[in-house]
Image (cartoon, rainbow, N blue to C red):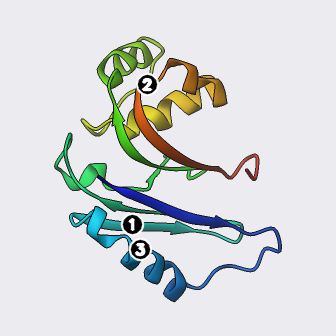
Amino acid sequence: MCGIFGNFNFSLSKISKIKLEKLAETIRHRGPDAVGIETDKRASIGNVRLSIIDLSSASNQPIISKDNHIVLAQNGEIYNYIELRDELRKEGFSFETEGDTEILLKAYQAWGVNFIEKVNGMFAIAIHDRTKDI
């Protein structure tokens, strides 16, 4: 199963890339297929990926919104991701992957933090919303 890691820095001093890479290395056994790290002055989110649903690199994490405002990584499985994708498509969203992580990003964009009430599965999610600095 994948692994997620990260930090949130109240002092606006960015964590070093070396420290983030060491964090990834400590859980690398959980996700041998890809490592991804997204960082800015406030937060870092990383993922070691075990590819299961969408095997393409398009589903590597963290996944970032097109406007670069939202960064999301998850570990687990979203059982109802197909139904959520259908619901989001009806609301005008389009998708670039076949994975369940992109569904979470778009659901957050559509419904805010209450999106979690619609999600069925076993998972952990890390979100950095740069517009809200949370």
The disc labelled 3 sits on which kind of residue? Ala
Up-down relation of residue 117 to residue 28 (above or below): above
**Left or right of 123 on screen, residue 35:** left
Q: Earlier in the sequence, mark 2 or mark 3?
A: 3
Q: Secondary structure at mark 2?
A: loop
Q: Is residue 130 left or right of residue 125?
A: right
State the mark number for residue 36: 1
Q: Which residue is mark 3?
A: 24
Specify whether 11 is left or right of 47: right
Dot 2, how many residues are within 10 Å of its Cα: few (below 14), some (14-19), or many (20+)? some
Name the residue furthest right.
11
x 57%, y 32%: residue: 108
Disc ID at residue 93: 2
Nearer the observer, 30 or 7:
30
Labels 2, 3: front one:
3
Q: Residues within 10 Å of mark 3 (few under 14, many from 20)?
A: many
- Horizontal side, residue 21 vs residue 51: left or right: right
Q: CA distance from mark 2 to mark 1?
A: 24 Å
Q: Residue shown at 20%/40% (left/top)?
A: 53
* Residue 32 in sight from this viewpoint: yes
